[in-house]
Structures are given as C-alpha cells and as structure tokens.
Amino acid sequence: MIAIDLPPLRQRGNDILLLIHHFARKISNELDKPTPRFTPDALRVLQDCHYWPGNVRELENLVHRLVVMTEGDCIRVPDLPPYMRFSVPHKPDFNRTLAEIEAEYIRNVLASVDGNKTKAAQILGIDRKTLRDKIKNGMENPED
C-alpha cells in the first residue's frame, strides 16, 4: 500500500484559486450557463477561508451553489455564505471595547448588504428595530 499525504485545502494557497475556476467552468458547462467571473475580493475571501470540512468536495459544492444561485455574470463577496463574509482573519486588538467591536461588525454587515437594514438585521440575528437602536445609540456614520 502506498500512502499519499495531501495537505488540507486551507494549506494549499493558490490551488484554491485554480480549483475555483476549474469548478466554475465545469459546472457552468454542465448547466449550459456562461461561466461567471469572481471579483478579486471574493477570491481573496475564498482563499483566506480556513473552514473547509469537506476539503475539495466542500469547495466544489460551494462553487456549484454560487453558479446556480448567483444572478448575472459576476460572483461578489455578498454572494458568499455569511460565515465567509464576516470571518475576515485579523490580529485581535485587545485595546478596543466590546461596543467598538460590535459597531465595526455592524458597519461591515451593513456595507456587505449595501446599507439594507432589513437584510443586515437578518444576518445579525436581531430585529430591525434593535439594529436601528444600536445605530442610533452608539454608532456614528454606521454605513461609512
């Protein structure tokens, strides 16, 4: 028996980009649809994602959903699943208050849905009224 050690998808760097484009072409051909393009930001989020429990199969399933569900010829960050859109890895800043972190998160969610408060509230798992209150009581320029 020969053992082949394959690193997980999250450790393959640019291989993810090659696989994304391969799956998008393959699935588009199968569905007789034009192959969508991915914005650079969407590709960066996909490449930076470290959550691939099914490895390549998980990536293929995601690309399949994106090709089927995305209207138009371009896949952008808002088209990606919420767990990807809002999990930008960064070094934590422990000198910020919880309120500051919450306000930043809410601003990011609002920006991802082009300021649509109803959609933002759904993503955040709160009432639209609660979102309005949070914006009114602690966030200056929430959509900056």
Image (cartoon, rainbow, N blue to C red):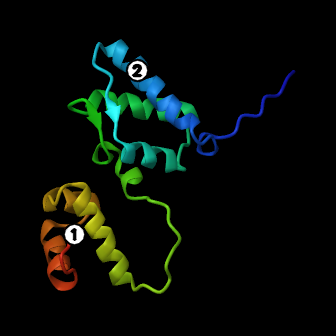
Tell me the element at label 1: loop
Q: Is residue 92 above or below residue 63?
A: below
Q: Is residue 78 above or below residue 26?
A: below
Q: Is residue 21 above or below residue 131?
A: above
> Which of the 4 image quarters holds residue 102?
bottom left
Q: Percent from the top left, x then y, of residue 29?
A: 36, 14
Looking at the figure, which quarter contains the N terminus?
Answer: top right
> Which of the 4 image quarters holds residue 74?
top left
Mark 1, Cα crowd under 10 Å, few <14 / some 14-19 / many 20+, is: few
Mark 2, Cα crowd under 10 Å, few <14 / some 14-19 / many 20+, is: some
Mark 2 belongs to which amino acid? Arg
Q: Percent from the top left, x then y, of residue 119?
A: 18, 56
The reply, left or right, for residue 116 in relation to residue 103 is left
Identify the residue shown where x is 29% and y is 12%: 32
Give whichever of 40, 96 is nearer the camera: 40
Give whichever of 5, 47 is nearer the camera: 47
Give whichever of 36, 82 is nearer the camera: 36
The reply, left or right, for residue 131 in relation to residue 66 is left
Q: Which residue is mark 2?
A: 25
Identify the residue shown where x is 51% and y is 74%: 92
Mark 1 belongs to which amino acid? Asp
Q: Is residue 132 above or below residue 79?
A: below
The reply, left or right, for residue 3 in relation to residue 103 is right
Q: Which residue is mark 1?
A: 144
Question: Are dots 1 and 2 in contact, CB under 8 Å?
Answer: no
